[in-house]
Amino acid sequence: MLNGIGQGGDHLGENAWQDVPGEYRANLRRIIVTQGDTEPASVEQQRHLGLTCPSQYDLRNLFQVNVEEGRHLWAMVYLLHKYFGRDGREEGEALLERRSGQEDNPRILQAFNEQTPDWLSFFMFTYFTDRDGKFQLCALAESSFDPLARTTKFMLTEEAHHMFVGESGISRVIQRTCAAMNELKTLVITMLHQYRLA
Ligand SMILES: [Fe+2]
Ligand SMILES: [Fe+2]
């Protein structure tokens, strides 16, 4: 944040807002609710993976990702409660009621209603979906609404670790697959299943 100066768009160079201007209230509320909704959704998608973790190291990473996503929800709800009055409190309640994949009350974005059935899906999720999230947060970090810009800046430092979990997970899977293919001298990946090597 450039010391309380609006960083982009129509309000570049003006003082950043410490409160929500009336004309942007609806838009800002929708943006914060949508961002907030993704955070607990990914925990709902991933929490069962603790039952099938490949190692203690992976379990720790999973829990760290889940705890931080939970904190991101808290950060968004704090903004809703502090700056959006009764509307904000109602949105906060609705965030607690929606559930990933639930037919009658699903999460807002479709990617957060899909299943994450195994660890490969989790690594893909943290590689691609968290990367997408990073760009959303980068945009919010330039908001002229100062409290939003400041909180998303901090969230970005945690997203970097989530992407590391995805990237290192995928490279370990590829490395082990290649090693197993070498051991069996085969290019047929389905063979690996048969021998339970990957
Ligand atoms: Fe997050
Ligand atoms: Fe994340």
Image (cartoon, rainbow, N blue to C red):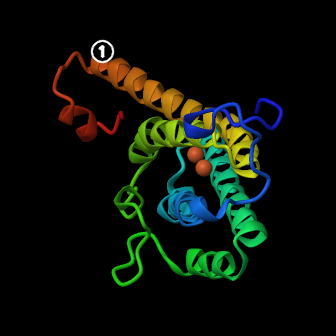
- Residue 64 in picture, x, y percent from top left: 69, 48
Residue drawn at (52%, 60%), measured in percent from left and top?
A: 27
Q: Residues within 10 Å of mark 1 (few under 14, many from 20)?
A: few
Residue drawn at (32%, 18%), measured in percent from left and top?
A: 183
**Is residue 51 at all visible to an observer of this figure?**
no
Residue drawn at (70%, 43%), measured in percent from left and top?
A: 149
| Quadrant of the drawing holding the C terminus | top left
Front-most of residues 140 and 155? 140
Residue drawn at (26%, 40%), measured in percent from left and top?
A: 193
Residue beneath disc 1 = 182
Q: Secondary structure at mark 1?
A: helix
Relative side of 34 to 151, left or right: left
Residue 103: name its quadrant: bottom left
- Residue 32 in picture, x, y percent from top left: 59, 59
Please state which amino acid type lies under the numbered disc 1.
Asn
Relative side of 18 to 95, left or right: right
| Quadrant of the drawing holding the N terminus | top right
Q: Is residue 2 above or below residue 194?
A: above
